Image: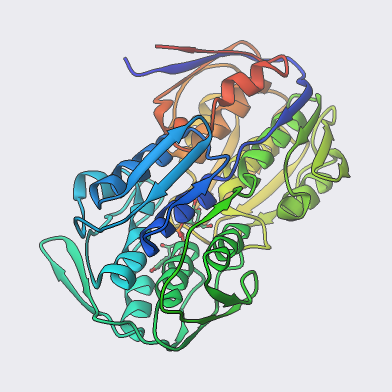
Amino acid sequence: MPARLVIEGGVPLRGSVAVSAAKNAALPALTAGLLTVEPLVFTNVPDLQDVRTMIRLLETLGAAVDRAGARVRVRVERVTSEVAPYELVSTMRASVLVLGPLVARHGTARVALPGGCAIGVRPIDQHLKGLTRLGAEITIENGYVVARASRLKGARIATDLVTVTGTENLMMAAALAEGTTVIENAAREPEVVDLADVLNAMGARIHGAGTVRIEIEGVADLGGTTHTIVPDRIEAGTVIVAGAITGGDVTVTGLVPDHVSAVLAKLEECGVALEVGPGRVRVCGPERPRPADVTTSPFPGFPTDMQAQLMTLLGLADGQSRVTETIFENRFMHAAELVRMGASIETEGSTAIIRGVPFYQGAPVMASDLRASAALVLAGLAARGRTEVSRVYHLDRGYERLEAKLAALGARIERRA
Ligand code: EPZ
């Protein structure tokens, strides 16, 4: 039986916890190693399943990757394969991030089409459209995207929608293109900014990261650098909700408060008391949260990756809330499991109506995707009695030792094989 988490709920969390570096910044940063023959060194890489998968993928492409604890060194002196195989890509969609760097550095890339995942179809048409604008020839062959370009040329790219990894892929490809590229409608997530910081430290000339318009002046080649990855705003938000939902008193450190401002604003609307300091947030949970309505949107709006966690809190509010998910078409799978714990949630398309209940009852539940599994852990922490969250490998993709962090705050939680 795959590992599961066993939680005895009802304990208000107390104490201080530091967040890890961001999964969604580490993944693109690692692929930037394809853009140079020099080594990239990252000092604080989180130990996550998705990071291990990305390292394996880079090694199949010819990278030498040395890992000593949180310190990871990536060096691609020569690209020995341009194929990102289906068996790796199908386990992690972020594999698509090797497409741009491979075409830019190596001239050809053959990346398995990721296929859908639990939360939606998640096409990559915007990535391909942008690479075509940069002069790549794109074909689809036997379930693989094949991209070829002798030398990419700068262009003006306007994506039809905001895409985080699409922006990252195009920024990396444009960094080595001939001439200047402008990406309009760019994603403004902090992870995009962190990647631009890595690329500029490597010698790229990127301006405007964090705004809707990024300008990239192509250079002939890029060098190595050493970089500390930005803190994980979604892990931070998740642990802050853990403090709130258990009525506890928790201080989360090592985060960038500005990266969670939409989440903090919504939690205050729910009656959660927050004290924000330099690199830290103290959260005191209310007796019972107040209801609130929320609509997910690209940064700086309320992040889709926090939607399941907030819904779990709203499930205990003293009133009705409405959650609207605008980013993915199927990201309410946690709702059915919360209902099994006593929640009253009705979903209709991209909207969920939550009628708060006074408490959750512990129950055996099953994780379905990364953030849904985090939501079920939160529900278990607040519930009366025992909750067992199965298929916890979903959680391990994006949270580094979450149960240890929660146990250090007093939670009665343990992993059982
Ligand atoms: C990134 O995924 C994150 N992953 C996701 O985090 C996050 O939920 C998402 O951004 C939104 O913030 C990484 O950064 C590795 P998108 P990404 O391209 O880049 C559609 C987690 O939990 N779209 O911004 O794949 C797409 O279907 C993960 O850590 C197209 O239609 O998301 C979605 O509806 C889950 N065509 C929307 O745009 C495209 O070419 C946003 O997707 C690209 C995207």
Q: Quadrant of the N terminus?
A: top left
Taking depth in this image into account, of 396 and 64 the one nearest to the observer is: 64
- Does residue 189 lie above or below 179 as drawn? above
Taking depth in this image into account, of 191 and 316 the one nearest to the observer is: 191
Is residue 64 visible in this depiction of the protein? Answer: yes
Is residue 90 visible in this depiction of the protein? Answer: no
Whole-percent x and y of residue 347? Answer: 52, 48
Q: Residue at x 19, y 56 (%)?
A: 81
Whole-percent x and y of residue 206? Answer: 57, 75
The quarter of the picture where residue 397 lies is: top left
The answer to whether 392 appears left or right of 56 in the picture is right
Whole-percent x and y of residue 361? Answer: 61, 18
Q: Residue at x 32, y 69 (%)?
A: 105
The quarter of the picture where residue 401 lies is: top right
Q: Residue at x 62, y 44 (%)?
A: 232
Taking depth in this image into account, of 348 and 176 the one nearest to the observer is: 176
Q: How many numbered dots are placed on residues in this image?
A: 0
Outermost residue toward the left in this view: 142
Give the colour scheme of this rendering: rainbow
- Does residue 98 lie above or below 404 as drawn? below
The quarter of the picture where residue 417 lies is: top left
- Does residue 220 lie above or below 27 as drawn? below
Q: Residue at x 57, y 68 (%)?
A: 200
The answer to whether 233 appears left or right of 31 in the picture is right
The answer to whether 243 appears left or right of 94 in the picture is right
Whole-percent x and y of residue 111? Answer: 23, 60
